[in-house]
Image (cartoon, rainbow, N blue to C red):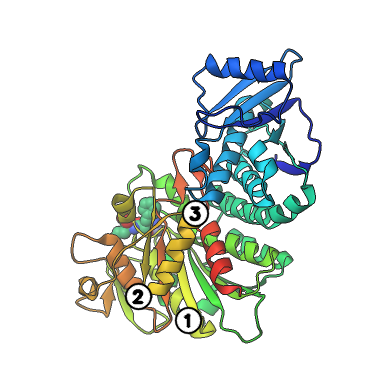
Amino acid sequence: MALNITFQNQAPTTVLCIGVHENGPLACDPGYGDKDTRDLLSKAIQNSTFKGKISQSLTVFTQEGQRLILIGLGVKENQDKSNREIYWQKIGSAVSCALQSAGCTEGSVDIHDAREEDSFVLSNIALGTLLRSWRFEKYFTKKEPDELFRLTQVTFQTTMAEAVEKAFSPLAILADSVFLTRSLVTEPGNVVNPETLALAATSLQKAGVTVEILEESELKKLGMGALLGVGQGSAHDSKVAVMRWDGGQKGDAPLAFVGKGVTFDSGGLSLKSSTGMEEMKDDMGGAGVVIGLMQALALRKAKINCVGVIALVENMPSSTAQRPGDVVTSLSGQTIEVLNTDAEGRLILADALWYTQDRFKPKLMIDLATLTGAMVVCLGKERAGLFATDDDLANKLLKAGETVDELLWRLPLDDAYDKEINSNIADMKNISGGRGAGSITAAKFLQRFVNNVPWAHLDIAGVTLMDKDLPLSAKGATAFGVRLLNRFVEDNYEG
Ligand code: BES
Ligand code: ZN
Ligand code: ZN
């Protein structure tokens, strides 16, 4: 069930979260409760391991049976030294975790620091609570209610409900769009296929996005031989979805976002080993981010023209599948020797990137792809890889990532790496001749399909699915990239 968030002058107090600083007096002091209650809380703190550290919490029952949940706020002086919005979002996340582990369905929050502050603080706490509360439980049919996520209502105590609501409303839209992406990534491969993912894109029409689906016959006519080769072993037709949000000046060149949408990557005839193959349902993560991003931009009526292009295929082995050694002709006219059918992401992106720059003449182009396992070897699951032909674009993306805590790390695109993908019988091959730098040679492959437009490539292979909880997302799909790109657009291109 979805979590409902409200802001009120008088919140219910049966379950109340209050903030406590590390090594300080009660944060609510002297604003909260009577002397007896404050004494009770002080004693509880003394007799526990609760120190007020960030993400610590402590539940105390009053004599009246009221449940007070102390939420650690960390050292007060450090608050302003860190990224303030992320700091408060993490406090919100702690609220979600504390209420959930206490088994509550409803709770209120009264954080003195926030009450005193502007709406920025409260709206960010609420965003953190919301982001951390998302769960995907639709396929459980046997669990008892108390085994499922129960929190359905969180009320924030504030004297400025209207102002906070106004600040929170674009953040709630953003969270909804993050959830759309997380759902699409979490749905299994028998549910999300090129058709259903195209339908998900089409449903953005209700948000005001113009959507066009290019069917396989049109892709053939256009000459997308690289993309079609990947999908030819699947029972599902390949597709390209084009989403446009025109919130800017008429005629202004759009920002373009391109996503890898391999709805399941078995590897094709270069079949992956069975260990972990199930994770390859997330190989449409880039496309999922583009869908979520386009929804966020449209719902908050961003003053900018944007286009999202997603390449939708399923990579399967079958008698019609592409063979290792096949040569395909891409939309650009360049030929590719497919030496490994598991290096398929670059093949579909080659055509999608070319198509996007050719048709839309964008101001800049950014692609997102769960492209290489080598990215996970290189950066683990802490940061995504950034490749860019333009320093200004790279720096804007790095900064947006820091702001929303979706961290990037820039890697090189030196020409020296490019020769590794020359083929003996075609213009290029889809895997490197050398052993190392798999993520870089993949990016160099993509670069061969990008002309003069400033371009960036985000390799999100490591950050799309997590096997552990993060502050702003429970274990599972993160939607890494939606908040980052939404902020990138907002901070740099909306005047
Ligand atoms: N979708 C995978 C990359 C991937 C791996 C994403 C692990 C998320 C987690 C991609 O299509 C792939 O299979 N890449 C190959 C390339 C190789 C054959 C050159 C890889 O990384 O092993
Ligand atoms: Zn693959
Ligand atoms: Zn793949």
Give coordinates of residue 363: x percent, y percent: 50, 80
Indicate the secondary structure of the residue bearing disc 1: helix
Q: Residue 357 got which mark?
A: 1
Sequence-first tag of 1 and 2: 1
Q: Residue at x 73, y 42 (%)?
A: 4
Q: Amino acid at mark 1?
A: Gln
Q: CA distance from mark 2 to mark 3?
A: 23 Å
Q: Which residue is mark 3?
A: 480
Q: Which residue is mark 2?
A: 447
| Image quarter (top left, top right, bottom left or bottom right) of the C terminus | bottom right
Q: Residue at x 43, y 51 (%)?
A: 463
Q: Amino acid at mark 2?
A: Gln
Indicate the secondary structure of the residue bearing disc 3: loop
Give coordinates of residue 45: x percent, y percent: 56, 19
Sequence-first tag of 1 and 3: 1
Q: Residue furthest front?
A: 30
Q: Amino acid at mark 3?
A: Phe
Q: Nearer the viewer, mark 2 or mark 3?
A: 3
Quarter of the render that holds ligand 1: bottom left
Depicted 235 relative to depicted 451: above or below: above
